[in-house]
């Protein structure tokens, strides 16, 4: 599909290099956030012509926005293959969704939650701060150890209430078989919460497994990682469980009645959505889902795998590049790669790429310190808790091209040239 780049807003906006010239940026940092689809910007602009208070006023515009907002819940469910047992709760982001979910589902600080050493902090800390957390570890390639998950579930003999796991790592891009994890967790009476932040724009995902015991119970994601950077995100979760809990997040829009000494809260979804809704965020998210479906996940997955293959083949033959994760068997990876250049800090590499080549990447530890410390073996090197030095991350979006990969590889090749390093041109 040659016209994908035409779908992206701002793709040709020039940025200034250190030498003062302006060139279009190459964005290889889609794991952090994605640029908007043009269709998303257009839809938001169109909808703002009819914007009114959601669920609160009686004007025509208010009625319109309320209707669009409500219908959006079904569009989210359809996108993620959720049936009538699930509902959509709008959130501001994955972090917001995870915290709301953890604060709602955890009933006592003694509740036991199983999560993993692969998680983004948003998939770890909301549980760690509220309950007893046990961690499944990763292997030397950074893949999740399924047998460790099983062992912990067995060891805790039904005491684990929730298994919180990411659908895909934001560091290595490994895709976890969360349906198999759900099957296992359900055998031991636990429910599964999946962090969908990374998978949402890169692979087709369904709440439903091959058999009902493999269904996902809760799924959380952010819209800004799926080409709609206007806030927004969602929790998709089991209605019967959500109905029994409320998050510790209070305000207007979530109550039936408030008296001097008594409060009657609304059931979900309203009970989970205190405050004024982010209407543009919802409109953008639904428009982004439509665009992703039009492009098609078969194409997206295949294209991003091709880019990853090209990238890894190029990096593997550079003697001073250290790659992390499995660079040979990559079929279970999203288009994400992490590496270091020997003798140069990840921060210097990222600065060099931006200042001299207008290439945007992310560096350091990607809000996944325990995982990065394992991959770089900093866990073995240091017993103290400190932010790891980390690595450089390339993460693809559907609009990235082979030419961009080649430009990146050429820049890294130049970087390994000692004259650049010694001339102080790294900055
Ligand atoms: C796997 C994963 N989970 C959670 C998050 C947090 O997302 P947000 O910052 O949108 O809340 C991220 C963000 O990078 C992520 O990659």
Image (cartoon, helix red, strand yellow):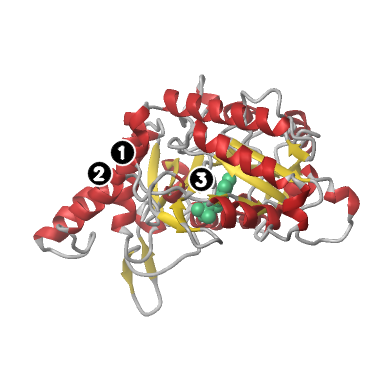
Nearer-the-camera pick, 135 or 10 = 10
On the question of residue 88 being in view, the answer is yes
Residue 112, position in %: x, y? 70, 48
Percent x, y of residue 196: 52, 41
Camera-nearest residue between 257 and 115: 115
Residue 165 lies, in percent from the top left, at 62, 41
Q: Secondary structure at mark 2?
A: helix
At mark 1, the secondary structure is helix
Mark 3 lies on a secondary structure that is loop
* Camera-nearest residue between 15 and 120: 15
Inspect this view and state whether residue 101 appears. Answer: no
Contact, CB < 8 Å: mark 2 with mark 1?
A: yes
Residue at (47% x, 37% y) in the render: 400
In the figure, is residue 378 to the left or right of 3?
A: right
Assign the C terminus to one quadrant of the image.
Answer: bottom right
**Mark pair 3, 2: CA separation:** 28 Å
Q: Which residue is mark 3?
A: 30
Instruction: Please state if 89 lies on the left or on the right of 20 as rendered.
Output: left
**Mark 2 to mark 1 CA distance (whole Å):** 7 Å
Can you tell which mark lies on residue 75? 1
Residue, disc 2 = 71
């Amino acid at each position: 599909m040659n016209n994908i780049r035409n779908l992206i807003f701002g793709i040709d906006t020039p940025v200034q290099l250190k030498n003062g010239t302006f060139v279009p940026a190459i964005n290889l940092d889609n794991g952090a956030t994605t640029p908007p689809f043009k269709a998303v910007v257009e839809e938001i602009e169109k909808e703002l012509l009819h914007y009114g208070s959601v669920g609160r006023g009686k004007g025509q515009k208010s009625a319109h926005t309320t209707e669009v907002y409500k219908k959006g819940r079904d569009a989210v469910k359809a996108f993620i293959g959720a049936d009538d047992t699930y509902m959509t709760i709008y959130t501001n982001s994955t972090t917001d969704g995870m915290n709301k979910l953890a604060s709602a589902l955890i009933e006592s600080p003694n509740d036991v939650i199983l999560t993993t050493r692969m998680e983004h902090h948003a998939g770890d800390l909301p549980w760690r701060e509220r309950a007893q957390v046990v961690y499944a570890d990763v292997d030397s390639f950074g893949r999740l150890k399924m047998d460790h998950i099983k062992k912990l579930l067995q060891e805790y003999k039904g005491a684990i209430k929730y298994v919180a796991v990411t659908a895909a790592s934001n560091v290595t891009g490994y895709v976890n078989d969360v349906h198999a994890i759900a099957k296992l967790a359900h055998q031991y009476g636990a429910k599964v919460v999946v962090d969908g932040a990374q998978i949402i724009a890169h692979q087709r995902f369904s709440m439903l497994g091959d058999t009902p015991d493999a269904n996902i119970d809760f799924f959380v994601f952010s819209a800004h990682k799926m080409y709609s950077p206007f806030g927004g995100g969602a929790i998709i979760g089991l209605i019967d469980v959500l109905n029994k809990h409320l998050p510790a997040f209070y305000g207007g829009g979530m109550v039936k009645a408030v008296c001097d000494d008594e409060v009657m809260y609304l059931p979900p979804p309203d009970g989970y959505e205190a405050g004024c809704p982010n209407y543009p965020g919802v409109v953008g998210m639904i428009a982004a889902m439509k665009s992703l479906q039009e492009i098609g996940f078969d194409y997206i997955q295949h294209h991003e795998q091709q880019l990853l293959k090209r990238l890894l083949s190029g990096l593997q033959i550079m003697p001073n590049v250290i790659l992390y994760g499995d660079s040979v068997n990559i079929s279970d990876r999203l288009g994400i790669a992490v590496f270091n250049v020997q003798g140069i800090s990840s921060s210097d590499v990222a600065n060099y790429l931006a200042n001299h080549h207008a290439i945007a990447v992310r560096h350091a530890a990607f809000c996944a310190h325990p995982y990065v410390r394992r991959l770089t073996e900093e866990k073995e090197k240091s017993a103290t808790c400190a932010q790891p030095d980390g690595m450089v991350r390339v993460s693809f979006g559907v609009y990235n091209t082979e030419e961009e990969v080649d430009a990146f590889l050429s820049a890294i090749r130049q970087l390994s040239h000692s004259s650049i390093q010694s001339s102080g041109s790294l900055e």
